[in-house]
Amino acid sequence: MNLIGQPLDRIDGLLKVTGEARYAAEFPEARLAHAVLVTSTIARGSIASIDASRAEALPGVLLVMTYQNAPRLPNGGKPPLAPPAGRRLSLLQDNQIHYNNEPVAVVVADTLEHATDAARQLRIAYQPGAAVVDFDLAKPNAHAPDKPQGRQTDTRRGNYADGLQRGTVRVDATYTTPIEHHNPMEPHATMARWDGPQLTLYDSTQGVSSAALAVSKTFGIGPNDVRVISPFVGGGFGCKGSSWSHVTLCAMAAKQTGRPVRLVLERPQMFGPVGARPHTEQHFVLAAKPDGTLTAMRHDSLSNTSTIEDWTETCCMVTRMSYAVPNQVTTHRIVPLNLGTPTFMRAPGETTGSFALESAMDELAVALKMDPIALRLKNYADIEPQENRPWSSKALRECYETGAQKFGWSRRSATPRMLRDGNTLIGLGMATATYPANRSEAAAIARILPDGTAMVASGTQDIGTGTYTVMTQVAADALGFAPENIHFALGDSSLPKAPVSGGSQSAASVSPAVREAATQARNQLIALALADPASPVHGIAIGDIDVVDGWVTSRSQPDKRDPAAAIIARAGGKPIEATSTVKPGDEKQKYAFHSFGAVFVEVHVDADLGTIRVPRVVGVYDVGRVLNQKTANSQLMGGIVWGVGAALQEESTLDTRYGRFTNGNLAEYHVPVNADIQTLDISFVGPPDPYINSLGVRGIGEIGITGVSAAIANAVYNATGVRVRDLPVTLDKVLGTVHM
Ligand code: MOS
C-alpha cells in the first residue's frame, strides 16, 4: 500500500476554491422556479385561517402551497422509514402546529425576489395552544425512549448499591449542555424536477440513497423513480443525515407547478425544522477506593425531544464502554418540548456524554488527590466492559503517554491557580476522546477505460471530509494506477449503493468496496495481458506480475511491460469492469470496535475579566489506518475547533415565551473564528485495525470533537479553581470568583 496514508492534496480543492464545484442550489435548469419556505410564528396550536389573495396576485407568483391545497400524500405523509432516513415531517397535510419555525407554506415564483416578496405577503392567523418549551418545567413529563439509536435505553451491571458502599471517595454532580445548531456553511437546499413519473432531486445531503428511498416512500412511488444527485456538500455534521420537510415540499411544489423548483432554507430557518443537538442534563455519581479504583458509576441522562418524534441524545454510550468499573447503572430519559425534533450532531451522545463523564473523572481525581491520567490508567478498560468483548485494537495508553509528553503535562500543578503569567491564570487539562467504529454494507464499481484511465464510483458522499481524495487513493493503490488517472464519482443514488455519511462510517464502509472492485478490475487487466500472445508480458508467471502506473509489468524484468490502453485495444477496445459489494461479517459479535484519543488543553484566563483563551491543544488519536495524513489531520482539526466552540461559545438561546431561538442567525450564534484558534497539534498512534475491514480503517469524522469540552472545562478548573458544569464555559461563570 504505497499511496495509502500519503498526504495527497484534495483532488476537488481547485474546484472548490475557484467556485467550479457545483452545490445543490447551483445546478442550472431551464424554466427553473424559485420557492420560499414560510414557517410558523407560534410554537403550538393550529392555523385558523390563511389569506393568500395578496400573495397570489403579485407578479410572477406561480403557487402558494398550504395545507389547504397541497397534494395529499399516502398515509398522511407519516414517516415511511425509521430515522435517520425517515423523519416525522411537516408536509402541509393538516393545520396543526407543533413548534415555532415549522413549515406552513411554500411560495413559488419565477424569481427568488418575487417568491420572497409574496411569502412576506401571506397572511396566516393562528389559534395558539399552550406550548411546552421550558425544559425545567417539563421535566416531570420525561419518559423512557424505546431503544434509542437501536441501543439499550438503560443498562445495569454488577451491584451498584454494593459498589457505592465500597467506594469511600465520591463525586455526585450534574452537568448540563445547551441546545446547539449545526450551521453548515451551505444551508439545506434542494432542486426538484419531474420528468413524467421520474423525480430528480439535487439535494445537499449526507445520504443520496437514503434520501431517494425516503422521498420515494413518502410519495408512494417506486424506489427507482427518485434519483438524488449531490456531488458537493458544504458541510453536513448530522443535520443533512435525514431528509427533512423541505426536500419533499420542494418536490411537491415542482409537481404542482409543472416546473423544476429550487428551495434553499434561509439561515434563520436552520433553527427548527432541520434538527439540533438537544439540551442535556446529566447526573453522575462516581465512587472509588482511595487508590483510585472505581467501584461504582451511575449516569442518568435527560435530554429534550419534540412532541412529534422521540429522539434521544445517547449520552450514556461513552460511559458504558470507557472504564473498567464493575458496578454501573445508566439511563436515558427524554422530555418532549414544542421544538423541532433534535437530531444527530457531530458525535451525537459522545460529545455531550464525554463532557459529563470526563469532567466527573477530573472531579474524582481532585477528590482523590490523584493525577487525572493516573486515575484513567488505574481504571483502564482492557476489554469492553459492558459486553465483555475484546477490543479489535486499542492504543489509548499510547495516546495518553504520547500526548502527555508532547503537551508537557509534567508542568501541571494539581493545585489550581499555581501557574500564572502576570494577570493571566494558566490552566492545563485533559480528557479521553472516543467514538465507535461503525461500518455498513457498501458497493463500488471500477472501470478501466480504453484510454488507459479508470473510472471508479460509489454512491457515497463527500460532505467536505475528503471522500473524493481518499477513495481515489484507495482505487489508485489497488489498481496500480497514478491517482491523476483515476476519476472517482460519488453523490448520485444511481451509483452502486453506499450508506449515509453519518456515524463516521463512510471511509470504513466504502474503502473496502472500492479496493475490492479495483482489485478485480486489475486482475482482469492482468489476465487479458498474460493471455495475449502479442503482449510483452505474455507467458510471465502471475507471481512475477505487478501493475505500475497503469502498466502491467514484470517485477523481475521491469522492461517487460504493457500499458492498459494497449491491452484493452488489442482485446477489442471494451472497458474492463468490476463491481463489488462488501459487508461486515460476524466480527462485531467477536470484538468491540472503537477509536480512541487523548486531548490536552492549555487555557489562559484573564484574572480580572474572566475571558478564556485556548492557546494550545494537543490531540493524539488511535483511529486504525489513516488513509490520508492531510485530510485526516483536517478532520481532527475541524472536530477540535468545534469542541472549542462547544466548550466556550455555542448555545442556542430559547425565548421560552414563544419557543423561538433568540440567536437564530450567524451574527449571534457564536462559533470559533480564526482568532479563537491557535496551536492545534494532532498526531496518530496505533496499528491498522486488524478486524474492521481489509484496510484496517476506522472512521474519523466525529472523534475529534469528543473530550474537548471536558478538557477545556478541566483546564479552566486548573487555572481558576472554578468548576463549571454547565456549557458553554463563558466568562460570567468564572468572573467574580477568579480573585478568591
Ligand atoms: Mo454524524 S452526527 O453521524 O453525521
Image: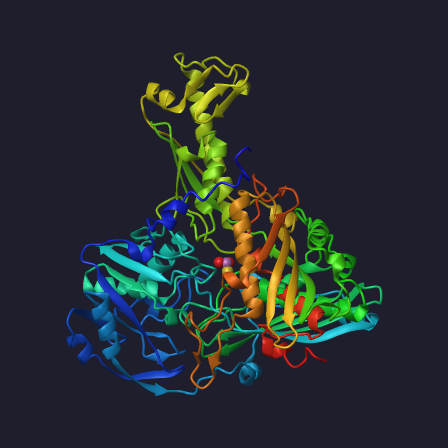
Residue for point 23% across, 74% down = 117
> Is 234 placed left or right of 394 in the picture?
left
Q: Quadrant of residue 561?
A: top left
**Which one is in front, 485 or 441?**
485
Compared with residue 169, is residue 21 higher up or lower down, i.e. above or below?
A: above
In this image, 695 relative to 237: left or right? right
Q: Position of residue 158 (x, y in %)?
A: 75, 65
Q: 604 left or right of 492?
A: right
Front residue (pair 516, 728): 728
Q: Is residue 348 visible?
A: no
Count of numbered marks: 0
- Dividing the image into 4 quarters, which one contains the C terminus? bottom right
Note whether 654 is above or below 475 in the view shown. Answer: below
User: Residue 439, percent across and down?
Assistant: 54, 49
Observer-nearest of 184 and 74: 184
Residue 423 coordinates in the image, percent (x, y): 67, 72
